[in-house]
Image (spheres, grey):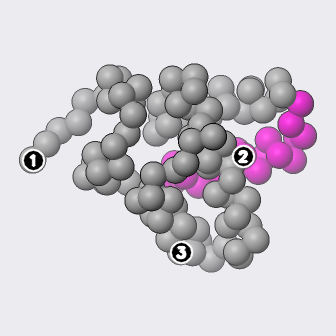
């Protein structure tokens, strides 16, 4: 399984703290974000595009994940999409070519 880039992991952790989530809940959210990150890179989906979420949820359903697990994953990725993300951060975490080939990044 792919590891989340350190900067993204830290930003997501800070965002969960800002949302006042418990440590226990935060661990679940981080787990689902890692699974989503791995899924998107494995199947060449854009991690930052909301259209990748239904594909991830379908994969969870196809692998017999419970409805509760699917809901946890959906809630996690919805939170991830709420998180403010700067283009500088995207560049600095070295997004894999699958993201870059489908995106246009503007440099200052």
Of helix, strand and loop, which one carries label 1?
A: loop
The residue carrying mark 1 is 108
Residue under the image location 52 percent in, 50 percent down? 4
Magenta span includes 70 = yes
Q: Earlier in the sequence, mark 2 or mark 1?
A: 2
Residues at marks 2 and 3 touching, judged by CB atoms closer than 8 Å: no
Residue 40 is situated, as x and y percent measured from the top left of the image, at: 56, 31
Residue under the image location 38 percent in, 54 percent down? 85
In the displayed structure image, the side of residue 2 where residue 55 appears, left or right:
right
Q: Earlier in the sequence, mark 2 or mark 3?
A: 3
- Dot 3, how many residues are within 10 Å of its Cα: few (below 14), some (14-19), or many (20+)? few
Q: From mark 2 to mark 1, how far is it between C-alphas?
A: 35 Å
Residue under the image location 87 percent in, 47 percent down? 68
Residue segment shown in magenta: 64-84
In the displayed structure image, the side of residue 48 where residue 13 appears, left or right:
right
The residue carrying mark 3 is 18
Q: Earlier in the sequence, mark 3 or mark 1?
A: 3
Of helix, strand and loop, which one carries label 2?
A: helix
């Amino acid at each position: 399984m792919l590891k989340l880039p350190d900067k993204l992991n830290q930003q997501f952790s800070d965002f969960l703290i800002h949302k006042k989530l418990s440590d226990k809940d935060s661990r679940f959210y981080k787990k689902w974000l890692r699974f989503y990150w791995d899924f998107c890179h494995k199947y060449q989906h854009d991690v930052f595009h909301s259209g990748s979420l239904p594909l991830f949820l379908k994969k969870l359903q196809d692998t017999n994940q419970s409805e509760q697990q699917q809901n946890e994953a959906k809630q996690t990725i919805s939170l991830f999409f709420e998180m403010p993300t700067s283009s500088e951060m995207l560049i600095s975490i070295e997004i894999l070519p699958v993201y870059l080939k489908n995106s246009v990044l503007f440099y200052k």
